[in-house]
Amino acid sequence: MSLFHLILVALIQGLTEFLPVSSSGHLILLPGLTGMEDQGQGIDVAVHVGTLFAVILYFWTDVKIAASGVPRLMRGKVDTQGAWLAMCLGIATIPVLIFGAFLRLTGLDEMLRSVALIGWMMLIFGLVLYWTDQKGALEKTAARWSMKDALIMGLWQALALIPGTSRSGATISGARALGYTREDGTRLAMLMSIPTIIASGFVLSWDIIATADAQLAKDSILAAALAFIAALFALALMMRLLKSVSFTPYVIYRVILGIVLLVIAYS
């Protein structure tokens, strides 16, 4: 891949990963609409890993709390805030691991990379985000996260493996449907991305080792670093805007893009 192509992919991923507009959908659209070579799922996951470090850094306080609870959780004790948060994050990750393994083993993950599907998912889940944001209560906070809510949000997150859905958009929709505030629902959605992206990164590392592709490894490292910078900026901007605006601007963008993609796909 050329340096320009890598920079473009990294910027797209970094700027869209934490916005409810589907970063994976945009990455798939890049070669589909520009004629560029498909960067492949290896680079796709690499830039996701770059965003992983961004979300860890931004939510470092919460990450430390969850990490401190892992040893107690492994001993079967859920008697601290950290152990509870770590347990809920684990529960929320189970659905996406199961669904992800199914898609990968059946080869459906490659078959789902189409402009038409992305268009439909952009449109449908954009409207879902609008409905849940407008109708959902604003009564729950992250401190009230329960195992049941974690599982439900995990099921929403699993749906985001379908390109165009948006991982952050789906989990935020789930949180708003459950009555979490915009800021706390988004915070939980961002924390849920950490174990999910770690799992994806693990799969990528095995792919690189299996293919012994040194160039792919170099490209992946560069793309991850660039995505980290872009993601940190986008994450800070979005969390600040949530204090004064709803998710409606993202919904409008999704609906317009979805309609445009459907016109392209069926014309």
Image (tube, rainbow, N blue to C red):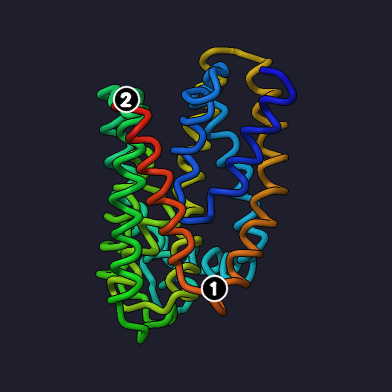
Amino acid type indicated by mark 2 = Ser
Residue 167: x and y in percent read 41, 51
Q: Residue at x 68, y 47 (%)?
A: 228
| Of 210 and 73, the residue lying toward us | 210
Q: Secondary structure at mark 1?
A: loop
Mark in the foreground, 2 or 1: 2
Q: Secondary structure at mark 2?
A: loop
Residue 223: x and y in percent read 67, 33
| Of 157 and 111, the residue lying toward us | 111
Q: Residue at x 45, y 67 (%)?
A: 247
Pointer 1 residue? 242
Residue 109: x and y in percent read 33, 28
Pointer 2 residue? 267
Q: Does label 2 or label 1 sit earlier along the sequence?
A: 1
Q: Is residue 139 left or right of residue 3?
A: left
Image quarter (top left, top right, bottom left or bottom right) of the N terminus: top right
Does residue 262 lie above or below 108 as drawn? below
Amino acid type indicated by mark 1 = Leu
Image quarter (top left, top right, bottom left or bottom right) of the C terminus: top left
Does residue 96 lie above or below 113 as drawn? below
Q: Residue at x 67, y 28 (%)?
A: 6
Q: Is residue 68 left or right of residue 152?
A: right
Q: Is residue 193 left or right of residue 170?
A: right
Residue 95: x and y in percent read 28, 49
Q: Is residue 92 left or right of residue 49?
A: left
